[in-house]
Image (cartoon, grey):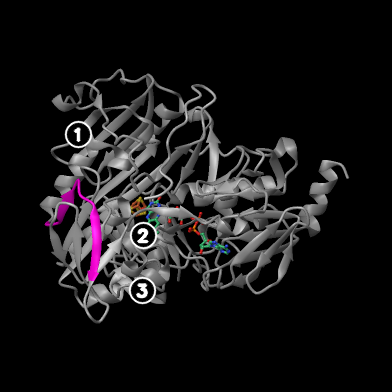
């Protein structure tokens, strides 16, 4: 499962690191280091992190099972307007 | 055909070609589909891989937290494109509206987006650049090669150039306990992007983390052993550093060579475009069917006197791609300008470094929060009485506030002397950017062209 964090938006709140510690980790006080490819078994954790991130910085693909799960698509499309 | 009708036809059955299948290319393709483009879409990319993300290559990958083969970008939606990966575009015929590709094919378009980005500037002495153990870091293949060598592990890594990428590489080395020497021509790391006041902090950060930082020196040569492996680097101060891995981090060159002779306004500084991302031809006349986005673009920004900005920034590639895609399929009044306020992040030695605006335009800096000594602060850059940029070390939550000051042209010096009453911040000091006539590889923001306001040509180092 692929993911990317918009680190311009990320404010180091670390919610993601609590919810999916194998994927997201803090490096120092507020730098986030993450793995852009998460294993299938970390899916639930990543889904929770996507939902919990207070600035909606995480985009993940395949959350709803489809190859190109469009967890973000709706929101991005409305952002684009 | 009237414009409205043409755009309706274009949305329904037009042909759009995107050259450069990376961050900007992918996000543009997704935007086209999200906005209802139903015609044919072709993605041409010279790398054999689907679009992947580059920032992790110098961070998570070198820290061992991610595989260099697995940074593909998540898709926001299906884009239903014809992918031509592993083939470079080699030419453009603007009159016939065709892109030539390396396998001899010609691909016709009604609208073209150029998002060919930049490539790493190699070590200028070719025979030395060929030595085994000499690397650059821009692509996934570069990262695979470098990571393999870092695992060995090397006795010492030698980094040429202390810009953001070079500093991040040094940081990853120290994190893994690998000895690292960094050689920088300027007096401190990051000075091209952030100036000497912040550079001094970055230098201390490196030294405290065990980096052997050599500033004010040039690398005069790399030396190989009898088997062609690099064994040492020679410096202008007469010293020699023994090393088995050299990473050349001397900035980037715009990928515009393939457009030579096409008639497009493309050169070593990138491709000039208007605020709507439409490319200029070489006469300075705007085209209406060729758009540019991402690292390869130079675009005028109203917040900065309409000077042309080239930004090697992830966020700019995304934002500009979205605007370019929207404008490609929209008629006049529905088009939007690309007004993104530059924003950048870097993470090194456990410190989160971010900037907004264009620091290198600033002539003075004022520390408004925190303290340089604690390496936790916000610094504000001023230019001609205005706030032009801000930088934060481990203080990201405040940047939005400063972004608004930049957007509204707030006065500089700022009227609150310091938010948290620290003594350092009370007055502005020179931001101490290097003399722009001395070439450096540093800035990730380049100003070029002239500002209509002051008719002043800003020198842009074209080469290392
Ligand atoms: C190691 C590293 C770390 C980075 N870290 C940060 C960071 O921390 N923060 C930040 O804001 N930015 C960072 N960046 C910059 C960021 O990655 C870029 O701004 C972004 O990749 C730009 O996207 P782009 O699509 O415009 O160009 P690119 O990603 O450069 O993509 C251009 C693509 O076009 C292809 N191409 C070139 N010529 C041709 C041709 N003739 N035909 C076909 N294809 C062609 C290229 O091979 C490439 O695949 C980093 C970059 C690197 C390399
Ligand atoms: S939860 Fe969001 S803001 Fe917080 S660290 Fe994770 S990505 Fe960044």
Q: Quadrant of residue A52?
A: bottom left
Q: Secondary structure at mark 1?
A: strand
Coordinates of residue B323 in the picture (x, y in percent): 60, 45
Q: Determine whether A40 is above or below B412 in the image.
A: below
Give the chain of mark 1: B
Mark 2 lies within 8 Å of ligand 1 (Cβ measured): no
Work out whether mark 3 precedes mark 1 in sequence or the reverse, and give the earlier one: 3
Chain letter of disc 3 in the image: B
Q: Residue at x 32, y 55 (%)?
A: B165
Residue B322's spot in the image, x, y percent? Answer: 59, 49
Indicate which disc, 2 or 1, sits on the residue closer to the N terminus.
2
The span from disc 2 to disc 1 (Cα, nearest Å) is: 41 Å
Residue B315, position as x, y percentages in the image: 46, 48
Quickly name the residue at label 1.
B370
Q: Say which of B57 and A18 sits in front.
A: B57
Residue at the disc numbered 2: B124
The earlier-in-sequence mark between 2 and 3 is 2
Can you say whether B144 is above or below B300 in the image? below
Dot 2 lies on which element? loop
Residue B239 located left or right of residue B430: left
* Residue B250 can be seen, yes or no: yes
Q: Is residue B284 magenta?
A: no
Q: Which residue is mark 3?
A: B144
Q: Main secondary structure of the magenta part?
A: strand
């Amino acid at each position: 499962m692929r993911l990317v964090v918009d680190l311009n938006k990320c404010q180091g709140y670390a919610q993601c690191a609590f919810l999916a510690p194998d994927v997201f980790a803090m490096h120092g006080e507020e730098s986030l280091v993450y793995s852009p490819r998460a294993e299938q078994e970390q899916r639930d954790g990543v889904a929770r992190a996507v939902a919990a991130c207070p600035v909606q910085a995480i985009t993940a693909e395949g959350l709803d099972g489809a190859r190109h799960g469009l967890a973000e698509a709706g929101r991005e499309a409305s952002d684009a307007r | 055909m009237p414009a409205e009708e043409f755009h309706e036809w274009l949305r329904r059955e037009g042909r759009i070609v995107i050259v450069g299948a990376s961050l900007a290319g992918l996000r543009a393709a997704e935007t086209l589909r999200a906005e209802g483009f139903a015609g044919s879409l072709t993605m041409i990319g010279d790398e054999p891989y689907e679009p992947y993300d580059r920032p992790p290559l110098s961070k998570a990958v070198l820290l061992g937290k991610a595989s260099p083969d697995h940074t593909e970008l998540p898709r926001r939606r299906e884009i239903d494109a014809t992918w031509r990966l592993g083939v470079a575009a080699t030419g453009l015929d603007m009159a016939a509206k065709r892109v030539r590709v390396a396998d001899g094919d010609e691909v016709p378009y009604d609208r073209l987006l150029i998002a060919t980005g930049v490539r790493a500037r190699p070590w200028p002495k070719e025979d030395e650049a060929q030595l085994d153990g000499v690397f650059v870091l821009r692509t996934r293949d570069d990262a695979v090669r470098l990571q393999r060598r870092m695992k060995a592990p090397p006795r010492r890594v030698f980094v040429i150039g202390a810009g953001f990428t070079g500093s991040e590489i040094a940081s990853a080395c120290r994190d893994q306990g690998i000895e690292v020497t960094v050689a920088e021509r300027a007096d401190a790391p990051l000075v091209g992007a952030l100036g000497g006041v912040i550079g001094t902090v970055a230098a201390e950060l490196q030294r405290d983390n065990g980096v052997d930082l050599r500033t004010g020196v040039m690398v005069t040569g790399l030396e190989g052993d009898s088997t062609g492996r690099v064994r040492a680097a020679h410096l202008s101060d007469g010293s020699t550093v023994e090393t088995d891995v050299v990473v050349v981090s001397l900035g980037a060159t715009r990928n515009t060579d393939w457009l030579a002779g096409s008639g497009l306004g493309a050169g070593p500084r990138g491709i000039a475009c208007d605020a709507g991302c439409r490319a200029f031809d070489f006469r300075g006349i705007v085209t209406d069917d060729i758009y540019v986005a991402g690292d390869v673009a130079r675009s005028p920004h109203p917040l900065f006197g309409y000077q042309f900005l080239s930004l090697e920034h992830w966020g700019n590639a995304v934002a500009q791609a979205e605007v370019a895609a929207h404008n490609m399929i929209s008629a006049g009044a529905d088009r939007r300008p690309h007004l993104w306020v530059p924003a950048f992040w870097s993470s090194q030695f456990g410190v989160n470094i971010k900037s907004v605006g264009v620091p290198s335009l600033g002539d003075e800096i004022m520390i408004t929060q925190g303290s340089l000594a604690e390496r936790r602060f916000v610094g504000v850059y001023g230019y001609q009485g205005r706030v032009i940029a801000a930088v934060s070390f481990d203080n990201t939550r405040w940047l939005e506030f400063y972004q608004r000051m930049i957007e509204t042209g707030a006065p500089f010096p700022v009227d609150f002397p310091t938010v948290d009453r620290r003594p350092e911040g009370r007055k502005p000091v020179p931001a101490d950017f290097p003399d722009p006539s001395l070439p450096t590889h540093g800035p990730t923001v380049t100003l070029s062209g002239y500002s209509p306001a002051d008719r002043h040509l800003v020198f842009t180092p074209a080469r290392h």
